[in-house]
């Protein structure tokens, strides 16, 4: 009976392609070697992409921020500066006489000048120009200035016409050396200001840097 059971088990093992508990030579069955576990690589997490520039304006830091200085609007009118002249250490506000019409009119018919003011005659070139006191109402000092911007001569106290004096009877006044500019001021101011030949001359205000001095 035991023999038939053994043969039945052996037949079933052969039919199934298996191995009998013992080989035909009677050796014990080999121990089964467990297969290693397969290593499944873990995928790296996908990189998260961000824009290089912030989609929203960054809030400006208030630390160390320089104050904003508003520029002067283009075309803004400049404040006019009173034309003037400095002769030696004396300064005068002046009315320029540049055109032929202005020089011909001069101070004829004008009231006496405000102290510290005058009229500045500006010519294109230096010469021994001749002045007269036609239609003048007050006496003048004439400061003659050369192209080199120094005083070359002074006429003191040129008087206005006397009553009934005709134009051809009026005295003429010219410098002892060529002049390009003539400063007319109230009589006595050249002396009180200490103006002397050789004094340097400089234009100021709106005349600064113009007309040679």
Image (cartoon, helix red, strand yellow):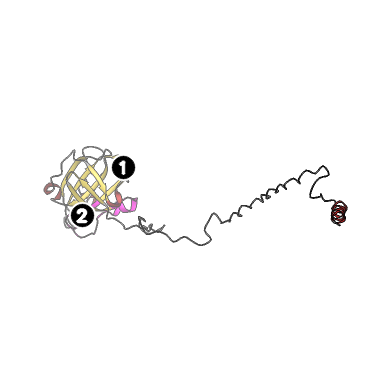
Residue that protrudes farthest toward the left in the picture: 192
Give whichever of 131, 147 is nearer the camera. Answer: 147
x and y, in percent, of residue 187 in the image: 15, 51
Give whichever of 70, 118 is nearer the camera. Answer: 70
Viewed as shown, does residue 53 lie left or right of 167? Answer: right
Q: Secondary structure at mark 1?
A: loop
x and y, in percent, of residue 54 in the image: 52, 58
User: How crowded is the residue under tag 1: few (<14 C-alpha within 10 Å), some, or many (20+)?
Assistant: few
x and y, in percent, of residue 116 in the image: 18, 54
Return the mark for residue 212: 1
State the separation of the CA atoms marked 2 and 1. 21 Å
Look at the image and say whether residue 103 sits in the magenta stretch.
yes
Q: Residue at x 15, y 44 (%)?
A: 195
User: How crowded is the residue under tag 2: few (<14 C-alpha within 10 Å), some, or many (20+)?
Assistant: some
Give the number of marks: 2
Viewed as shown, does residue 26 lie left or right of 151? Answer: right
Q: Quadrant of residue 197?
A: top left
Q: Is residue 212 visible?
A: yes
Return the mark for residue 35: none
Q: Residue at x 20, y 51 (%)?
A: 92
Q: Are marks 2 and 1 in contact (CB under 8 Å)?
A: no
Q: Secondary structure at mark 2?
A: strand
Look at the image and say whether residue 58 sits in the magenta stretch.
no
Residue designated by label 2 = 117
Viewed as shown, does residue 95 lie left or right of 156? Answer: right
Boundaries of the magenta span: 96-119
Q: Quadrant of the N terminus?
A: bottom right
Give whichever of 76, 143 is nearer the camera. Answer: 76
């Amino acid at each position: 009976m035991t023999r038939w059971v053994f043969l039945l088990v052996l037949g079933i093992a052969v039919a199934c392609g298996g191995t009998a508990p013992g080989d035909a030579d009677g050796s014990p069955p080999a121990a089964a070697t467990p297969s290693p576990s397969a290593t499944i690589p873990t995928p790296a997490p996908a990189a998260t992409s961000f824009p290089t520039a912030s989609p929203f304006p960054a809030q400006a830091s208030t630390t160390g921020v320089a104050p904003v200085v508003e520029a002067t609007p283009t075309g803004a009118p400049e404040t006019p500066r009173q034309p003037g002249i400095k002769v030696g250490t004396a300064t005068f506000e002046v009315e320029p006489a540049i055109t032929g019409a202005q020089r011909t009119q001069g101070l004829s018919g004008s009231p006496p000048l405000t102290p510290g003011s005058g009229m500045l005659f500006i010519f294109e070139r230096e010469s021994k120009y001749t002045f007269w006191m036609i239609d003048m109402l007050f006496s003048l000092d004439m400061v003659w200035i050369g192209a080199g911007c120094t005083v070359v001569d002074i006429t003191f106290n040129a008087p206005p016409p006397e009553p009934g004096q005709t134009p051809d009877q009026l005295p003429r006044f010219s410098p002892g050396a060529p002049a390009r500019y003539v400063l007319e001021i109230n009589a006595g101011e050249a002396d009180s200001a200490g103006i002397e030949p050789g004094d340097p001359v400089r234009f100021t205000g709106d005349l600064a840097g113009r007309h040679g001095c």
